[in-house]
Amino acid sequence: MKLNWKRAAVALVVVASMGASGQSITPKNAVPRKDETWWKHALIYEIYPRSFQDSNGDGVGDLNGITQRLDYLQKLGVDAIWIAPMYPSPQVDFGYDVSDYENVDPQYGTLKDFDRLEHEAEKRHIRIVLDMVLNHTSDKHAWFVQSASSQTNAKADWYVWNDGVSPGDVGVTAFQKRYVHTGPKGDVVPPNNWESYFGGSAWEWVPARGQFYYHKFYKQQPDLNWRNPAVERAMFAAMRFWLDRGVAGFRLDAITTLYEDPQLRSEKELDGTNAQGDPRLVDDKTSNLPEEHDVIRRMRQMVEKYPGNRVLIGETYLGNTHQLDEWYGGAKQDELQLPMDMFLGFGPGVKLSAEYFRRYISEAATELHGGQPLFVFDNHDNRRSIDRFGGGVHDIAIAKILATILLTTRATALTYYGAEIGMRTNTPTRKEDVKDPIGITGWPKEKGRDGERTPMQWTPGPQAGFSTNAQMWLPVAPDYTTVNVQTESGEPGSLLEWNEKLTALRRSNAALHDGELTMLDAGTNVLAYVRRVAGAQPVMVVMNINAAETTVPVNGTAKTLAASDAGVRVENGKVVLPAYASWVAEVR
């Protein structure tokens, strides 16, 4: 079908152009969004602080290192940086086991260093978003130390504790019977079959209390009891500590797991075992419970008392777009402003396919009650997108397609350090080299997440410019001599240059900045849509998701704004796209 923007309403695969009211808007009726809320137009850049820049030569990245690299982030077009946990921590799970929510871990710096980072970022119009771990603390946190000491202390019910059950009780599974302990009333096992994400039972025995505590994640990460109002007050106070210091908001870690089934019922077992060798379970008793939404609404009310459009971003791995809509608050839009849409990048059956991308971009446009989509292809928990979507031949061109989707759709964009230069997953090949706890317990089926957390590749020089110390916390990937910021900067056709070009267009072009999105039916292997806003020329975005050259007819006059491949050409009323090429153009 011809890509005729004037007939875009006819060319819709689905109605994919929605206004805030939820009414469809065809291009001829397009109106400005008239909403400059910063996070609705933002590029948010995740930084894993251990791996971004080491400023003091100890082999570990730090806050002053981030400050040193702010000019690069500004040039890239970053609007906000999300910093993975930088709080004091025993680092069992590299910061996601927090022992103090109101300070900075000494290996990353000090509160003074954080204030300096925030001040320097503000000068460059870059906001700071912090990772907030609300589901659990470290077992070294003062709250848990006190809670674990007895059943009668002031924080005895700040965590999820249980006496356990007799090994002979009806319904006790073979899995539970692996974990027998002798309690005050004889032998006991965990109260149900719940499992830790890192392997084994999710219940850990504490002799001093004569009880088990629940941990969804590592055993050093005990789950807080959110059914206790005192816990909510304490965690909200920790968030206010940082809001008062000026942070722009929070990325909420594992936010769908705050509550557990109050009856502690076992979860349904599926066939087979997981990477840890444990039974596969349906986690409907430990994730996405209805009570979650009450606390999020209260959190939203608290955050909205601060000026500057502070934002709540959710780590929301969910089953479908309908469930994602619930985390916005549905029609009321009173919960998270930006729950992560994981479907494009990590969804079930995810693949490099125009049909696949078209489906989820369209669902985000039509099924979120006008909520602002947040698209993401990369993070610190998954193999890098260039490896997941690439096939080894056209990887850079494919990475440019992902960047095009991320930066030209009507969505807030979330990226991860190094994606803009094509950093790859560098998974350890030996168990003894693994640092990630899930890789240690799951080897060799589960090799952990070290591969996507290797140091940022800045230069072709020693340690890729990340550190002056050859003994880094993780080794630099071997391709750093060619895949690095210095080499790709100013290099025509590089992945970095493509990202910089798109972020500049995203800011300067009215249609890409504000326009509604209309999906076009352009054939099986072509993803295409139009962005249009009143008072500006429409912009058409076309991607050839195919290893063969594709020719696409275009009605009207086209002015190329950006082309990912030098072989893209417009001639005789058509655009010719080489394999996996992307094209962005104004159309008349």
Image: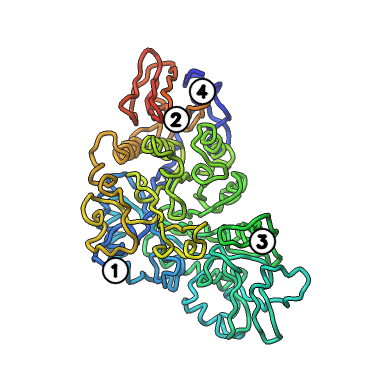
In the rendered image of this protein, does residue 357 appear above or below residue 164?
above
| Residue nearer the viewer, 544 or 105 | 544
1 vs 3, front mark: 3
Which residue position holds label 3? 285
Q: Amino acid at mark 3?
A: Lys
Residue that label 4 marks: 8
- The residue that label 1 is drawn on is 112
**Tag 2's secondary structure?**
strand
Q: Marks 1/4: CA distance?
A: 53 Å
Q: Earlier in the sequence, mark 2 or mark 3?
A: 3
Tell me what residue is drawn at x 32 percent, y 37 percent. Answer: 498
Q: CA distance from mark 4 to mark 3?
A: 45 Å
Q: CA distance from mark 2 to mark 1?
A: 44 Å
Residue 115 visible in the current orientation: no
337 relative to 462 in the view: left or right = right
Disc 2 designates what residue? 531
In the image: residue 337, left or right of residue 128? right
Decide: few, some or many residues near mark 1? Use Cα within 10 Å; few <14, some 14-19, many ≥20: few
